[in-house]
Amino acid sequence: MKLKCKLLFVVFVSIQFTSFAAMTNAAASEGITDPNTQYSIGCDLHQQGYANEAVRWCRLAAEQGHKLAQLTLGDCYSDGDGVPKDYTKAIEWFSRSAEQNLPEAQFALGGCYHNGNGVLQDYKMAVKWYRRAAEQGHVNAQFNLASLYFNGLGVPQDYREAVKWYRRVAEQGYLKAQRYLGRIYSEGVAAPQDYKEALKWIRLAAEQGDPEEQNNLGICYFNGQGTLEDYVEAYAWWSIAAMNGSTEGKDNRDGVRRKMTESQIAAGQARSKELMAVIDRKKQIAKLPADQAPTADIAPSGYGSGLLVKGGYVVTCWHVVDKAQKISVSCQGKDFFASVVHKDAGNDIAILRVDSTDAGAALSFADSVKLGAQVFTMGFPHPELQGSDVKFTTGSISGLTGPGNTPVYYQISAPLQSGNSGGPLFDEYGNLVGIVAAKLDSLKMLAATGDLTQNVNYAIKSDYLVPLLKTVDGIKIQPSQTKTVNLLSLVEELKKSVVMIKVY
């Protein structure tokens, strides 16, 4: 059984122009000259079905240089909405808006040159405008630019540049780009063949509910491409593909079933139910607005801890959030949407920005940390089992280096569990000593040495955090605290800024 996934790259040419929701219900009256108000009235009229009047008001705003009105007027001419369809006039208004650096207009103008709408088809000009929009983060422009590089249209064929843009889009969850990258790496087209990398992108597309990629993921598990051969996992993905209408998935599932034991089949059926729950959760999350935290009825896929510092930033470990589709931060009973603003993947550090708050702890660091120094941490180990209130543990610095003598970590004796990762490690004065990162796997150590280790845990030294913090505006670092304080009072104060991180 071979991976049935021909590599067919067709330049993406469908252009979807922006539509705007109503912004005001104010009654229109002659004599209104403010372009923002004119544009708002136009949008409101369009929503109510008065397309001709909407165009009139948008034109008033567009002629005064309102870039959104110019884009909207271009849309109206390209669609024949409220005016006769006229690509030449659409290009005129798209051009005015695009020159004001509006990415949606740049994408639309690129599409006109791409498709030859109102102008002679000109891939070089399409590349120009797609690139300007792509560099501002416009996802469709990024995808189209990748396709033009892949096919050598308007630019010399450049597979490396194409893969770069496909990857950028795929990392934002764009299904078609994930599918293309799966083909590229599985078949060795445009990049060296890499089944492990192919599996990564095929899986992401499959988890978005694409039946073709669900079938291909089953094939990867059946053949052991990029992973260990696993009939149970193959059966599970083929069952899901079949349920979603894939004839190949159904045939493959029925074929592998004849090679499986009854217990394997039962395990495959149970696994397919687990995977369906994951897919359903991702679909729920994808429907949320970009700046909205998931609601309580969507279960997180993982937990971590962090420290909220003044300015509304959260310090945590990169491995806590690096696979997250959405990030939510729970602070004193409230959930906030958060996003990664800076990361140091090499040292496993991330800084998040939390919407709607500038609160947080004042940040200070210990001048020096010595062997045997007393430390404590707070965090949220296994919140689904141990509850959502913050947990406090104490210990000491039991080593000044980490595994293999790496200088990045302190070894600490404070007990840690899953969910503690990313939490703060303080000294007795309230200075931040480090970020809780990992615990030694006792079972692996038992297998390797015959000794069952206990309380061997690690924290990233705060020295490796400081350079990253200095790149963030709004974070201030105070001098090291040296005044003796009551531990109970200190914990009571600091716990207000220790947050639970939920990843989805």
Image (cartoon, grey):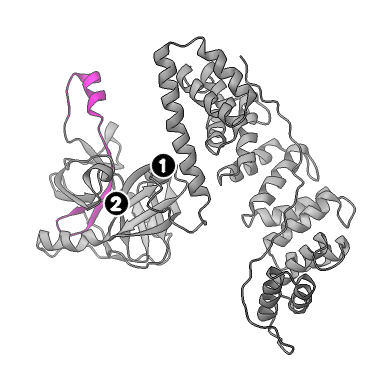
Residue, far bottom? 31
Q: Which residue is mark 2?
A: 462
**Front in this rendered view, residue 476 or 341:** 341
Residue 150, picture quadrant: top right
In the displayed structure image, the side of residue 296 where residue 230 appears, left or right: right
**Front in this rendered view, residue 26 or 432:** 26
**Front in this rendered view, residue 407 or 26:** 26
Q: Please tell me which residue is depicted at 64% across the width and 24% down the height of the picture.
A: 247
Query: Is residue 32 in view from this perspective?
Result: yes
Q: Please tell me which residue is depicted at 19% across the width and 59% down the height of the picture.
A: 430
> As shown in the figure, which amino acid type bears the numbered disc 2?
Ser
Range of residues picked out in magenta: 426-453
Q: Please tell me which residue is depicted at 77% across the width and 70% down the height of the picture.
A: 51
Q: Which residue is mark 1?
A: 346
Q: Earlier in the sequence, mark 2 or mark 1?
A: 1
- Classify mark 2: helix, strand or loop: helix
**Front in this rendered view, residue 457 or 479:** 457
